[in-house]
Image (cartoon, helix red, strand yellow):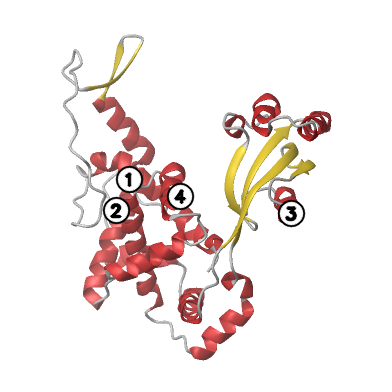
Amino acid sequence: MRRTDLLKGLIAVQAACMIVVAVVVLIRLLPVSAGGAPAVPPAEPEPAAPDGGAVVGQVGGKAVTKDELLQALEQQFGKQVLYTLMVRRAIDLEAEAVGLSVSAAEVERELARMIDGYASEADFYQAMEGQLGLTKEQVAEDAKYRLLLEQIAMRAVEVGEAEVDAYIDSHPARFAPDIRVDLAWILTETPRLAEQAVGELEDGASFAALARRYSMDEYTAEIGGEIGQVDLDDPFVDPAVLEAAAELEVGAIAGPLVVDDGYAVIRLNERTVSQQMDETRIREAAFRLAALSLAPPLHEVERDLLLKYEAQVLPPYELGN
């Protein structure tokens, strides 16, 4: 299955990465089950503020206290973290009531599907930590709860071999090998600057040096214009960049390209093609996707579980619709 098919799942749980920074606040508000929240390592003793509170930072000689930090985290993330914790509690209750479970092997297979398309397992976990703030253990925990929620959603859905065949026939791109490209770019405000960069590159100038000099993308300019690895159908990368990258030889450049934010010069560093899934994995993935397409949306399943188990929240942590 293509890695982009998993983006919805990852984006949908992006709020879960905030649990790590706010769970210490919410544990005081809501008890959680033994697998329901990330572990918080014991903190080192902090120096005391003049009023007796623990100091976690200083600016201009003025203390920032732990109480101030926790209050800010609670105000900013409290509602959505509490919602996530309560949904996990409801999932645990429902799974126990109807006899559903997720084995360690199933979690490992799900993680393998998520890792597929990355250059390595290390690259995947580095991306999860860098982009979503999730540790390896938290990625696995989230995968477990996502699989349990899917099982709950799919209980009333019947999918046979004919439905699986139809799903595969209707979605061939989902089961094709995943093509990824490693790119660098120089993003300029005017076509003249982009053309100047192309000319200097043709004369042998360093791409990284020119990115630092010309690119207005501050984040990538600092690292020599490196975007990193992306899918050729990545929805977050400008289509003009992806179309040009698909035609390039490794090491070649293209540009100037008209993109949403200006004019781009790109270089293809590497192209990788993931291994084609075998028939068993294709049918397993198609069964799951076909069943989920017929099942209620997962956010509705979460809402129904909270209603079923009479979830109650004290003000000001009222759950939104």
Give the spatial CA distance, label 1 vs label 3.
Answer: 38 Å
Residue 229 visible in image:
yes
Which residue does the image show at 58% across and 29% down from the upper left? 222
Which residue does the image show at 46% across and 44% down from the upper left? 131
Residue holding disc 3:
243
Q: Quadrant of residue 73?
A: top left
Judging from the image, what secondary structure is the residue with disc 3 in? Answer: helix
Three-letter amino acid code of the residue under disc 2: Leu
Three-letter amino acid code of the residue under disc 1: Ile
Q: Measuring from the top left, give residue 22's x and y in whole percent.
A: 30, 40
Residue holding disc 2:
85
Residue holding disc 1:
19
Give the spatial CA distance, label 2 vs label 3.
Answer: 42 Å
Q: Quadrant of residue 62?
A: top left
N-terminal label among 1 and 3: 1
N-terminal label among 2 and 1: 1
N-terminal label among 4 and 2: 2
Give the spatial CA distance, label 4 vs label 3.
Answer: 25 Å
Whether pointer 2 and pointer 1 mark residues with C-beta atoms closer than 8 Å, the reply is yes
Judging from the image, what secondary structure is the residue with disc 1 in? Answer: helix
In the displayed structure, would residue 134 be above or below residue 144?
above
Q: Measuring from the top left, give residue 58's x and y in whole percent.
A: 31, 16
The residue furthest front is: 204
Give the spatial CA distance, label 4 vs label 1.
Answer: 23 Å
Is label 2 or label 1 in front?
Answer: 1
Is label 4 or label 3 in front?
Answer: 4
Judging from the image, what secondary structure is the residue with disc 4 in? Answer: helix
Q: Measuring from the top left, give residue 8's x and y in whole percent.
A: 51, 59
Residue holding disc 4:
123
> Badge 1: few (under 14), some or many (20 or more) residues near its Cα, within 10 Å?
many
Give the spatial CA distance, label 2 vs label 1.
Answer: 9 Å
In the displayed structure, would residue 44 be above or below residue 293?
above
